[in-house]
Structure formats: structure tokens, C-alpha cells
Amino acid sequence: MALKVFNTLTRKIEKFVPLKGKKVKMFVCGPTIYDYSHVGHAKTYVQFDIIAKYLRYKGFDVFYLQNITDIDDKIIKRANENNETSKKLAARFEEEYYEDMKSLGVDSIDKYARATDYIPQIIKQIKTLLEKGYAYETKDGVYFEIDKFSEYGKLSHQPLDQIQAGARVTINEEKKNPADFSLWKKQKPGEPFWDSPWGKGRPGWHIEDTAITETEFGPNYDLHGGGIDLIFPHHESEIAQMEAISGNKPFVKYWLHTAFLNIRKEKMAKSLGNFLTIRDMLSKWDKKTFRFFFASTHYRTAIDFSDENIEQAKKGLDRINEFIRKVLVANGKDNKKVKELIEKTKETFEKHMDNDFEMPQAVAAIYDFIRDVNKLEIGKKDGEKIIKFMRELDVVLGFMTFEEEIPDEILALAEQRVQARNEKDWVKSDKLRAKIKEKGFYVDDTTDGFIVKKL
Ligand SMILES: [Zn+2]
């Protein structure tokens, strides 16, 4: 079946047809690295991770690019508070961000692009916009003149006069329209800077992304994603910049946006005291529980984060993992109905994922499968088929557990045993093996090191 997606630009469910064959150039707005990432980021990035992995599952050749905003007002402010350079602060939180993504199993991204590595390309884009008459210089920077781009507002579906009325009153009298947005910010004392034709300064936020994507993908590409809060002005402005520069429309064919994450039905905000980082949540809950939690809600539906809801998700995931454990040791009579059930479930899973990534319905298909298999007597071969199938689905979903977790204590003993063997202390090595066995585990040596299994 053909994949369909909801496109924010057209507000329609559309058939997903990449610009060039099976190749998909996909870009999702990355973080501004001035602090630890929060659970809202976790939702967005886990859901896009599942989307990218499903596109690959469908046979698309996806190149997934994400930007890293490593220069910005918030970074400068925080660095000043900490008495360190913006560069140092950003480098630290960039590493923390990768660590968080690793913890969440978000590993579908092919390339991370740091904004400050694209300053020449950013300057080139701004120069083009000035030359083409879409931008103007003031005392404090360079601005994009939205009145010159008649389609400004087409992504957020609001008329220009409404945007103008909604724009914050600006103290900058040189701005032609209060909603004109910044392309280049001239340096204020003490701020980090790069040289440019407009003097020392740094890029605006929106131009980072178009400079990065034009460099990596060219002027047009297939899929742009991000949180729903980025539609305006961020993504709207990206469209204005890139379509003004290249004249090729549409800049991006499909725009996908993930809905908000609320905390106990309230918006998450530092001022409300309900701000939760990914680290906070991983200290309390297993990472796979989160992937399951985020996969249990449609990406365009707001999710309510609370201990009760995570507890609920944990119970749901436990049922899947219990099933896997049971199937792994199945030794009854093989049943030809299993093959049928696998085929039916695969079809249902794909039908829902093909319909704008209906993850909750796709997960529900797995529960139906579990219920149906549980009614049957199954054999070892059936078990193997089921595990193979579940693993295929989990390449996309990433929340199932197929191997017994080996406790750290056992791993430590196994490592001591390797040490003893290296020292040719066979008595000690045998004693350690016996001790590991006593605790219910089996250890053996392979050419790649040791393996430990539950007995
Ligand atoms: Zn962005």
C-alpha cells in the first residue's frame, strides 16, 4: 500500500511521493543546546525516529539530517551567567544531547549539522536575499522584508495583515514591518561574532536551517519536520528565505509537525515548576517505556505526561515483553495458523502506519496478535517465526526486549573470569564460572570475547 502523510502546507493527507525515486531527504529541527533537553524534545525526536525508521522499512532510501543550533540568544545569556564562553557551553550540551538521544534509542539520524559550521553559506544566502531585494540592512542587522514575499503565511495559513497585527511591537524603528525577521544580528558588546559584509555579527535562527539544507540537499527536498510550535515563525520564514533565493516552489514537499507534550494537562514551563528533562525521566523510568509511551499516541495528538500515564504504558509494554519471553521457550506442537496470523498482523500494522503513521493503531495490531497467538498451542519453529516478525517490527518501534538483561554483578564476575583466563589462572576461572552458574547464568568464550546467558 502507498504511504500517506498529513502535510501541514496543504492541510491534507497526501500520497507520499519523494522528488526523486525512492530517495528521501529528511530534515528535522534539532535542539538549541544551552541546557539539558526536556521531555517535549524526547517526544518529537522519538516520534520522528519512528517515522524515519518506518520510511526505511518501506524501502525508502532516507537521508535524515538534523541541525544543531549552537549560537543563539539563550546560549549567550546562559554562558554569561555561567561565566564561560558560548562555544564551551554549547559543546558541553551538544554532547549531553547526543547522550540523551542514545539513551532513547534515537539512532536514525545520518548527520548532525552545527549552525556555526555553515557561516559562509549563511552569509551567501543573506547576500542573495539582499541582491534580489528581499532583505534590507539596518543599524542592528539584516532583515527579511516579508511584504516582498507575497506567500508569507502559507504554511501557518494566516493572511499577511494578521501576521503584521500579531507581531510584537518593536523598538527598532528601522524595521519596515514589525514582523520582518532577522537574518543577521550585528554584534553587541561582549557577544561572540563572525565577520560578514555587514560587520561583525551572527546569524538569525531561521537562516541557519536553509543554509544547512541547501548545502546538504540543494534548494528543494522531501520532508521537513519539527514540533508544532515551530510552524510560525520558524518554518514559515524558512520557506520565505529559500523560495525567495531559488524561485523553486515548493521548497519542501511535505511538512510534518508533532503535537505538544503537556505535563498533567498543563503546558510544560520552567515558570510553572513542571519542567522535566530527559535525564529526570530516565532516572525514574526505563527508556523503552518512553519509546512505547510516545508510540502509543499519534504524533499529531497532544500527549499528557504523568506518572500514572507512564505506569500505564509500562504495564502495556510488560505484556508485549512477557509474550516474547513465553514465545522464546515455546515447545509445543507447531501450528500452521501462526504464519497466517503473522501475515495478517503485518498487513494491519502497515495499513495503519501507511495512513500518516497511525502508531497507536499499529501497536494495537500487535496486541491483537498476542491475544490470538495466546489461544494456540505453538512449537519451537513457530516461536522462531514470531520472534523474527517481532524483531522486524521492533526495528521501527524500538521498545521491545528480546534478550534477558544480564545484571551488572554477573557481568563483573564474567570480566574477572576473563582476567583470570588471561593470567592462565584456570582454578580461579573455574571458580568464577561456578559462582556465575550458582546465580543462574551461563558463561562461555567466543572469538569476540565472552557471552553470558540466563540458565
Ligand atoms: Zn529549525
Image (cartoon, grey):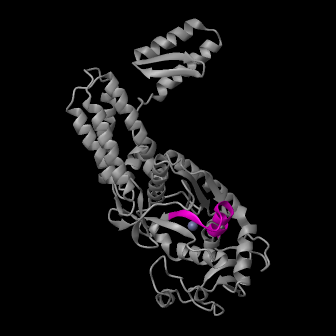
Residue 449 position, x and y percent, is 58, 21
Residue 203 versus residue 179 in the image, above or below:
above
Residue 53 versus residue 189 in the image, above or below:
above
Taking the spot 51% from the left edge, 25% from the top edge, the residue there is 411
Q: Is residue 279 visible?
A: yes
Residue 34 position, x and y percent, is 59, 62
Quadrant of the rendered image holding ligand 1: bottom right
**Number of numbered discs visible in the structure rendering:** 0
Residue 437 versus residue 129 in the image, above or below:
above
Asked whether, in this view, residue 166 is left or right of residue 381, the answer is: right
Residue 395, by quadrant, is: top left
Taking the spot 64% from the left edge, 93% from the top edge, the residue there is 173
Q: Nearer the viewer, residue 47 or 101?
A: 47
Asked whether, in this view, residue 328 is left or right of residue 19, the answer is: left
Taking the spot 64% from the left edge, 61% from the top edge, the residue there is 217
Q: Is residue 187 visible?
A: no
Residue 391 position, x and y percent, is 41, 37
Range covered by the magenta-colored residues:
208-225
Please check the rendered image and state whether residue 211 is part of the magenta-colored stretch, yes or no.
yes
The quarter of the picture where the C terminus appears is: top left
Q: Residue furthest left?
A: 375
Residue 327, by quadrant, is: top left
Residue 304 position, x and y percent, is 34, 60
Please check the rendered image and state whether residue 406 is part of the magenta-colored stretch, yes or no.
no
Q: Residue furthest top?
A: 427
